Image: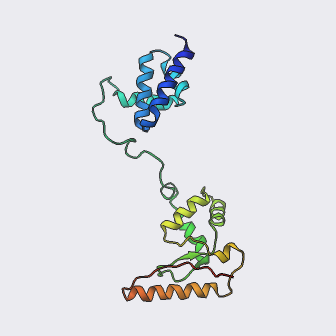
Amino acid sequence: MSDNSVVKTIQDKYELLWPYLNEKTRRIWAAIEAQSLGWGGLTLVAKATGLSRTTIHAGIDNLCKSDGTTRSDYSDRIREFGGGRKLLEEKDPTLLTDLELLIEPATLGDPESPLKWTSKSVAKLAAGLNQGGHRISPKSVYNLLESLGYSLQSNRKTRDRSSHPDRDAQFLHIAQQVRYFQSENQPVISVDTKKKN
């Protein structure tokens, strides 16, 4: 059987199995397939599936311990503990502090207020952080702001490039009302209204 026909056979099997495989079972299946082909099998399976040789080697490691005995410690986990990407704030310990320094002058309302918002866009904040030596995208800034409790819905007037002259006073009034009703154990509901022309 030629290498091309072997690759085609593996591709056909892989296409049928792929929807039922997760990351771990995919690499284990590829490892079994590569081992069953013998010498050169790893290359053929990588070519047929598009999986990297490193991934297939990881599957072989999942199958066997270093002494050649079969692994008996299978779990429902797909990745080993500690696998996957670390959080940005774990990799870059000064990131949150620098983000808070950037938004502090543009943070509106009382810091103790349940409502916090910033007038800077996530794109401007990401650019400022990147200039300060961090590597971060606007989407990651958005996620960090959300985790810090900032309101991220932009006001329609802001998107239209027009702003009410007392916009900050309006938000401060809303924040004061929220604090008052929360201190009275009353519910607070946010309603976004649009003025009809």
Residue at 52% across, 25% down: 11
Please tell me which residue lies in front, 67 or 154.
154
Give how far across and how far down residue 25 sits, in percent: 40, 34
Farthest top residue in view: 1
Q: Name the residue nearer the viewer: 84 or 153.
A: 153
- In the rendered image, residue 170, in percent from the top left (x then y), is placed at 59, 87
Side (left or right) of 180 relative to 121: left
68 relative to 109, above or below: above
Q: In the picture shown, does residue 95 fall above or below 31? A: below
Q: Nearer the viewer, residue 54 or 48?
A: 48
**Colour basis:** rainbow
How many marks the image carries: the answer is: 0
Q: Residue furthest front?
A: 197
**In-image side of 190 versus 170 (left or right):** left
Q: Residue 135 falls in which quadrant of the image? A: bottom right
Q: Residue furthest left?
A: 72
Seen in the picture, residue 99 relative to 133 is either above or below; the reply is below
User: Could you say where residue 197 lies in the image, as x and y percent from the top left?
Assistant: 69, 82
Give the answer, above or below, for where 57 lies relative to 35: below
**In which image quadrant can residue 75 be found?**
top left
Residue shown at the point (54%, 82%) measured from the top left: 109
Question: In the rendered image, which quarter is residue 195 located in?
Answer: bottom right
Q: At 45% from the left edge and 16% from the top edge, which residue is drawn?
A: 37
Residue 97, image x, y percentages = 53, 67
